[in-house]
Amino acid sequence: MSTPEADIRAVLEESGPDYDGFTFETPGGGHQSDVYMVTLDHGGEQYEVVVKFKPAGDIPFDIEPKLHEYVANRTDVPVPRILVFKREPAVDVRPYFVTERVHGENLATEFATLSPEDRRRVMRQAGHILGDLHSEIGFEAFGRLDLHDGRLIVRDWMGSWREYFERLTRAHLSRLDETPFADVKGRALETIEPALEYVPEDGVPRLVHDDFRPANLLFEAGTERPITAVLDWQDVLAALPEYNLAQTEFLFIDSSVTDPEVREGLRSEFHEGYTEHRPMAFDDGYADRRPLYQLSTLLWRMAGFESVFDDDSGLVRARAEAQYRQQFERLVEAIPQ
């Protein structure tokens, strides 16, 4: 049976430099167990890299290293540089890639305790990053991105954003049955179906990082641009930018900040950062559609509840469930009828 140490050693023997020894650790903040931060000893010096193996199951893997390169070549978004990618390793390990190690703390573990100034800087830069991403990269249809013969394609494409958003949201709903939230499924449907008429059908599909949350960002406190890296590019869509904006507002602000004045101040920073790169009419119906997009995001989080909190105590799970239910009630009430 393979072990992380044996797999990392095999990777280094196949693709790494000569080294005298290595140590490794897994990152915190919600990353998969398939990711390892590796420190190599060579000639009295230390070198740091990150090794990521293909997760178990039928999960697209080639798309992530492709997007690291694709985004780095077209934007200023901070993404780690790919050093090695092996789709079919010669050694007995799963497919893998190796990236440079970007220094910074995981934002998920620090976000709640950031100083007000650091939090404002994070939100402004988050907006700047998404504005950069949305202004530079567009597609011809809506859907999830994949690779075909080494080229990016839209896999399950649709011409209507409304139809694709509905499909995406129904997929989240279909996964609620095996979670503690099976009881909200009917009420969610009753709320979402009539509100879909507010969702635009047309627009230019833009590149959307569908897992843009604090756990997938590295940052350094006290700097002008604290976000040092955007990680985990395997969940990527061609979607309307406003969907990505609403998601980010929920995951960074609306799900964690209770003070209305602080919440709106952070939202303003986020919007201003975004419009530095790309014009956006936030007063043109966006506020009405935002809770619908955010409810879809919450349903996605609910669907993954068991895997996220599987190893936590009953008290932690109970608190998280109560928080999700409170958020659900707030969003259902906020959606226009």
Image (cartoon, helix red, strand yellow):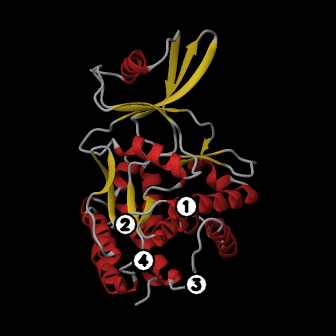
Q: Amino acid at mark 4?
A: Leu
Report which residue position mark 4 lands on: 292
Comes first in the chain, label 4 or label 1: 1
x and y percentages locating residue 164 in the rendered image: 30, 71
Residue type at mark 2? Leu
Q: Earlier in the sequence, mark 2 or mark 1?
A: 1
Q: Are marks 4 and 1 in contact (CB under 8 Å)?
A: no
As drawn, 90 above or below 303? above
- Distance from disc 4 to disc 2, alpha carbons, whole Å, reads 11 Å
Asked whether the residues under the numbered discs 1 and 3 touch, taking CB atoms below 8 Å apart as contact, a structural biologist would say no
Residue shown at the point (27%, 44%) measured from the top left: 149
Residue named by callout 1: 130
Q: Residues within 10 Å of mark 4 (few under 14, many from 20)?
A: many
- Residue 284 lies in quadrant: bottom right
Q: Position of residue 85 (x, y in %)?
A: 39, 32
Sooner in the amino-acid sequence: mark 1 or mark 3: 1
Cα distance between the residues tagged 1 and 3: 19 Å
Q: Horizontal placement of 74 versus 165: left or right?
A: right
Task: Mark 2: give few (<14), some (14-19) or many (20+) Cα within 10 Å.
Answer: many
**Judging from the image, what secondary structure is the residue with disc 3 in?**
loop
